Image (spheres, rainbow, N blue to C red):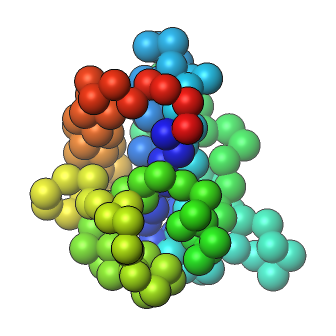
Amino acid sequence: MKIMFVCHGNICRSPMAEIIFKDLLKKSGLDGVHFCASSATSDEEIGFDGIGNPVYPKARKTLLSHGLDPEGKRAVQLKRSDYERYDLFVGMDAQNIRNMLRIFGSDPDGKVIKLNESDVFDPWYSGDFETAYNEIYEGVSRLFERLTSRGENDEK
């Protein structure tokens, strides 16, 4: 299964989700079976040279405090062509979902979902990175359990 976590800028929430999911995969021995990445619906964190910004310092600090290292992760923008390359797109809030549907044009295969019932508010605005981390961790853990308990451990 190929999963893309998506937020507005790909410097806070979606990289947190990607790093947490990768850690769960590694700890369960499934890192060779499932693949995940993260991206942004905007190009605000992509430089004129095409190179994206690294994980936001406060998000990085929060991840490191939980033993997770985001080293090397840089913002990338979601593309229409990603729809065919990934099995599932997981947005952090309702606006992310609307923007993904705009980018893709539609969601004929039902691949676009929101991580949690309620929005994971952007800590870039609130400054509350620990709450965002906890909400993301809970949502990613539920998603991980759902995917691994459904027998989706076969390579796709």
The count of marks equals 0
Query: Would residue 110 appear left or right of 52 to someone viewing this image?
Result: left
* Quadrant position of residue 135: top left
Front residue of this view, candidates 30 and 127: 30
User: Horizontal and vertical percent for residue 131?
Assistant: 24, 46
Q: Quadrant of the C terminus?
A: top right
Place of residue 16 in the rendered image (x, y in percent of width and height, measured from the top left):
45, 45
> Residue at point 34% right, 50% down?
129
Q: Residue at x 33, y 81 (%)?
A: 98
Work out which residue is located at the far right of the displayed protein and give it: 49
Residue occupying the far left of the picture: 117
**Which residue lies at the image location 42% right of the left edge and 54% below the top edge?**
88
Q: Position of residue 118 (x, y in %)?
A: 14, 60
Task: Classify residue 128 as left or right of residue 64.
Answer: left
Residue at the (34%, 25%) spot, across then down = 151
98 and 109: which is toward the camera: 109
Q: Nearer the viewer, residue 37 or 147?
A: 147
Compared to 4, does 8 lie above or below?
below
Task: Locate residue 114: give its quadrant.
Answer: bottom left
Q: Is residue 126 visible?
A: no
The answer to whether residue 31 is above or below residue 10 is: above
Q: Is residue 143 visible?
A: yes
Q: Quadrant of residue 86?
A: bottom right
